[in-house]
Amino acid sequence: MSARISFLKNPDPCNHLSDYKHRYGTDGYKSFQSLFRCFNDGRIKIKLQLIEIPRCSYCSVYQKRLYICLICRSISCSSHVLLHTQLNKGHDIAIDVERSELYCFSCIDQVYDPEFDEIVVSKQLIGLGMSVKSGTDVVAVRSNKKRRLDSQLIIGSKFLVSPRDRREKWSFPLGLRGLNNLGSTCFMNAVLQALVHAPPLRNFWLSGQHNRDLCPRRSMSLLCLPCDLDVIFSAMFSGDRTPYSPAHLLYSWWQHSTNLATYEQQDSHEFFISLLDRIHENQGKSKCLYQDHEECQCITHRAFSGLLRSDVSCTTCGSTSTTYDPFIDISLTLDSADFRKKRYSGEPSMNATMPTLSGCLDFFTRSEKLGPDQKLNCQSCGEKRESSKQMSIRKLPLLLCLHVKRFEHSLTRKTSRKIDSYLQYPFRLNMSPYLSSSIIGKRFGNRMFAFDGEGEYDGSSSSSPSAEFEIFAVVTHSGMLESGHYVTYLRLKGLWYRCDDAWINEVEEEVVRACECYMLFYAQERVIQKAHKELSYQVISMADAFPFADC
């Protein structure tokens, strides 16, 4: 490995995995190779001989997640993994029967080892009818961008997946590729799938606007998250359908966010914010967002940044103090959103127990009376007065990320809980009612007058940013607060695909609507329309990366 990329390495394994490999090497991995089975959906599972349905050795249950010990091949369910390692000293490492991923009984967590990953992928390639001569071939298959011409048929100017690539349907769009779980990293995989298929970000990296081979940070052996993302975009759109392991990105992110450098499950929303912040920093953009009306031109802010308007009004004289704050996502209160809307507006609610996205947005932009400890120092009245506050959106972003607050933490009661309420959300979203022009217009009786440039969203100009959005990705969370799982649903060319770590399959619209949405990704309607017209794979010019200069 050259000195310039010596910092790119796989995350260190846990101590128990290191001890196991010190004692047994990879012989234990290889002994399981005959038990791996590649199913029609592309998943690699463990199929035990003479055992039709695997069961826990301690409770005989078979519905739960099951793990098979690498040493004694005893099967334990998630409730008895600790008991097994306590009764059998040194029996710490096992394989997830359903997912074929390494699991540490002592850490109670998934762990990652590229040598194990190589054996699993070898089995996958054999199942796909592809020859594998050595371990180096596996690495090449998974990382070599040039393989896209070998695994595709070129018809005219369009690319179709070759029939011999049986892992995916021939009609799956290019760019759909599974991401291996590196040890409770579903939170990262879910966000990466959404970002990879966001049209502005995809165009930015595939057009070479951040080229890892030319990046000055790489030449100085410095960590660079945009370079790692360049690798991922190249891998995802290479045409290779075998699952990809984003280990370099994980390691690089750990170095930038040392407080989150752990194999424990993280929050997808926190990872999303942290990743965009690190991209902004790595691109060397020190300019303060919206300072002196100069917007940051890094990819993060060009794609996701918007502007919130906050109006604090004196309830006595009506004078208003206005401030503006940039945002890259909006966090919405989910719990009893429609009930709260009813309480504040006095209007009846037909769906008090079924929150809607419009109800959450209405609640976010409602007028809220501030408490007595938040009195406004009113210049008109010359003294502190009671006040009310109302939020609205001054500037819409090109990509709109709506974060649904499902995790609630109470400092007073010292408790935490997950909100499992179902949320109705549209695939096509009109944000006009939540713009400052609409909110302030209602406050003043919809009188027609200009105020602080809010008229830019009246839709009268063909060049004004659109308030019509279409959904393109949904990140979901299932399970409990402490031990949940993240999955992403992608909408590509009108069809929905479920991205569950390494596995991707097409699903019906009803499946997406019934999920526990956690992050909703919308793009301006014309951005989606332009993306639909693009070929599945093409070299995108730098001018096309951001087709709308005013966005």
Image (cartoon, rainbow, N blue to C red):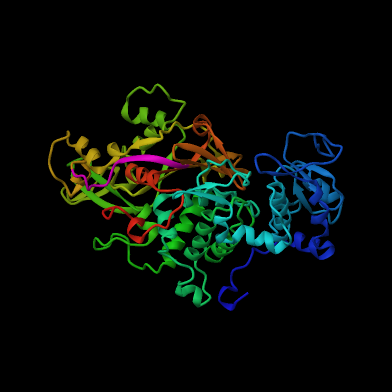
Residue 218 visible to the viewer: yes
Q: Quadrant of residue 420?
A: top right
Write the residue at 52% across / 65% down: 256
Q: Nearer the viewer, residue 494 or 523?
A: 494
Whether residue 467 is in magenta: the answer is yes
Is residue 509 shown left or right of residue 143? left
**Vertically, is 486 above or below 350?**
below
Write the residue at 13% across / 36% down: 447
Write the residue at 33% across / 55% down: 546
Is residue 492 shown left or right of residue 293? right
How far from the left and from the top, in percent, is residue 147? Answer: 58, 58
User: Which stretch did the figure color magenta?
Assistant: 461-473
Is residue 303 shown left or right of residue 265? left
Write the residue at 43% across / 39% down: 333
Q: Quadrant of residue 332?
A: top left
How far from the left and from the top, in percent, is residue 71? Answer: 85, 53
Task: State the count of labels.
Answer: 0
Q: Nearer the viewer, residue 547 or 116?
A: 547
How far from the left and from the top, in percent, is residue 372? Answer: 32, 44
